[in-house]
Amino acid sequence: MSDFEGLNEATYRRAGIVEEYAAHDELHEGEVRVLERVGDLSGVRLLDIGVGAGRTTGHLAPRVASYAGIDYSPELVGACRARHPGVDVSVGDARDLSRFGDASFDLVLFSFNGIDYVSDEGRRRVLAEVRRVLVPGGTFVFSSHNRDYALLGKLPWQTGRPGRAMLKQSAHALLHTRRRRRMRRREVVGPDHVLVNDNAHDWSLLTYYVSPPDQVAQLRDAGFTVVECFDQWGEPGERDERSVWRHYLAR
């Protein structure tokens, strides 16, 4: 595990973060639209990766033939189990799905950009492992931060959006100046991605941003042959600058 991956994982084990995730139980608009494209889920064997505190679990577990959820944060798994007793949720790492046999699932979901908090090498292991556990013709649905986003890397006062929200966000950024400076020294610019310290969880994470063509290329390298791209709100399209993240459906 790389140094920054350990920092990211530690963030997702903090009590305040667990409480924050436990306060949400809604599917995002883009998730709803993309999952509608998957079709009828009644006979589906689903692996839900990065379940957090169970935001997606309550919506999906009752709809599928079988459900397994994993997250690498024991604290988040505990919160998920408390909210959804009796549902199969356990501690697990998407980079190593060896507990699951080949072709074990019809659908794999990795929601809310969870794939963006491992290294580039780790990300490619995730894609390979997901491909292995899917049946031929199976579907992988996930979201990932968008390198084409117009405000990527900008601080609140650099966005050109004056008003109360900008002032509040600026004060928050200034409050965490020391952390931002420390984390930004770890940022990476790669040929097909960047690792950026954005404002997530008080500037405590390094987040992977990738443009849609490069993400499609990664998926094809991992053995996926059909890839659909959607914006943050679930509208189809190859590229855009408005979306902080993008949704992908790969078969």
Image: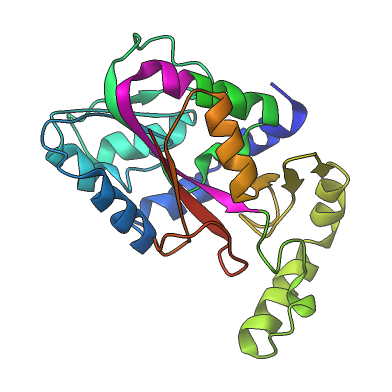
Above or below 20: residue 91: above
The outermost residue toward the front is 225
User: Is the residue 100 above or below the residue 7 in the image?
Assistant: above
Quadrant position of residue 172? bottom right
218 and 110: which is toward the camera: 218
Name the spot of residue 105 as percent of width and height, x first: 28, 22
Position of residue 139 relative to residue 184, above or below, is above
Give the x, y percent position of residue 21.
43, 51
Image coordinates for residue 196, horizontal then vertical, percent = 74, 50
Q: Residue at x 29, y 56 (%)?
A: 32
Number of numbered discs on residues: 0
Whether residue 92 appears in this view of the structure is no
In front here: 49 or 250?
Answer: 250
Q: Is residue 64 left or right of residue 114?
A: left
Instruction: Indicate left or right for 5 with 182 as reference.
Output: left
Colouring style? rainbow
The residues colored magenta run: 129-146
Residue 110 lies within the magenta run: no
Query: Measured from the top left, where is residue 78 in percent x and y?
Result: 36, 33
Residue at the extreme bottom of the image, as rendered: 163
